[in-house]
Image: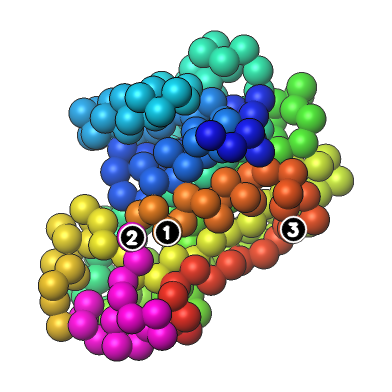
């Protein structure tokens, strides 16, 4: 187990499966005490906690809707109660998506995606910055390579993540004087439970994505955790305000 994040407390939102679970495991392996946040999948979150514990790490699962300010306050309070120190690593991974033509976008879907993908990122970052005993911190927002490739039929999701990119850069400038670094990663298409539920895995779209990726495959959840653990650590102390494309070369 690496000690590059030893002594840190990390919250990973949407960490019961997929990218979030991989990131939570990587942060724990690097020495951080991890809060595995979930909204609905309690069993999945507990599995991630059990996996981390089996490897000698520290983790607990906390239910919270990141788009609800009261839940976010409780999430941060739970982390402090469990680990006795402020949260100094925040990974905003929780996200929802729907793909289809512009004509299919509804007000309900607009608010569902913007509330989780953007408002959730705002509320959790506010909560981290509001800790008055914080001595530096790292925020990593999970965006999408779609903000670079701009494919059709994902206008709402990609717009929400483009807003996350802008939020990343602007908050890095605002919070930098306090020693709070803010970066984002932009994953390419990845084989996750969410991708399977959307029908992407095994589809013609996946085949086309693989063909457009120089490394010749879709991503796996474990491809992103090591980068996030690095960005959370002092090894990345001179990196802030960046959106890092992590897509196997797709761009």
Q: Earlier in the sequence, mark 1 or mark 3?
A: 1
Q: Which residues are magenta?
A: 205-220
How far, Cα to Cα, is label 1 from label 2?
5 Å
Identify which residue is drawn at 74% across, 44% down. Answer: 234
User: Marks 1 and 3: CB-CB under 8 Å?
Assistant: no
| Of marks 1 and 3, the one in the foreground | 1
211 falls in the magenta region: yes
Tell me how far mark 1 sits from mark 3, CA to CA: 20 Å
What residue sits right under mark 1 in the picture? 223
- The kind of secondary structure element at disc 2 is loop
Residue matched to label 2 = 220
Q: Is residue 123 visible?
A: no
**Can residue 68 be seen in the rendering of this structure?**
yes
Q: Which residue is most to the right?
A: 177
For disc 2, the neighbor class at 10 Å (few under 14, some 14 to 19, many from 20) is: some
Instruction: State if disc 2 and disc 1 touch (CB < 8 Å).
Output: yes
């Amino acid at each position: 187990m690496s000690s590059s994040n030893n002594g840190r407390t990390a919250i990973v939102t949407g960490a019961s499966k997929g990218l979030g679970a991989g990131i939570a495991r990587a942060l724990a392996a690097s020495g951080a005490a991890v809060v595995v946040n979930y909204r609905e999948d309690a069993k999945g979150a507990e599995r991630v906690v059990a996996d981390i514990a089996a490897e000698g790490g520290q983790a607990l699962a906390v239910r919270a809707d990141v788009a609800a300010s009261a839940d976010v306050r409780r999430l941060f309070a739970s982390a402090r109660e469990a680990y006795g120190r402020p949260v100094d690593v925040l990974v905003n991974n929780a996200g929802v998506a729907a793909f289809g033509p512009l004509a299919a976008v509804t007000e309900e879907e607009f608010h569902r995606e913007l509330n989780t993908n953007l408002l959730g990122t705002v509320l959790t970052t506010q909560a981290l910055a509001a800790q008055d005993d914080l001595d530096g911190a790292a925020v990593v927002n999970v965006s999408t390579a779609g903000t670079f490739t701009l494919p059709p039929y994902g206008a709402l999701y990609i717009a929400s993540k483009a807003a996350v990119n802008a939020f990343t850069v602007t908050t890095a400038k605002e919070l930098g004087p306090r020693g709070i670094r803010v970066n984002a990663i932009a994953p390419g298409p990845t084989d996750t439970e969410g991708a399977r539920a959307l029908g992407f895995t095994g589809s013609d779209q996946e085949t086309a994505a693989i063909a457009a990726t120089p490394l010749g495959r879709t991503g796996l959840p474990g491809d992103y955790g090591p980068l996030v653990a690095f960005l959370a650590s002092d090894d990345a102390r001179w990196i802030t305000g960046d959106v890092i494309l992590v897509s196997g070369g797709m761009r």
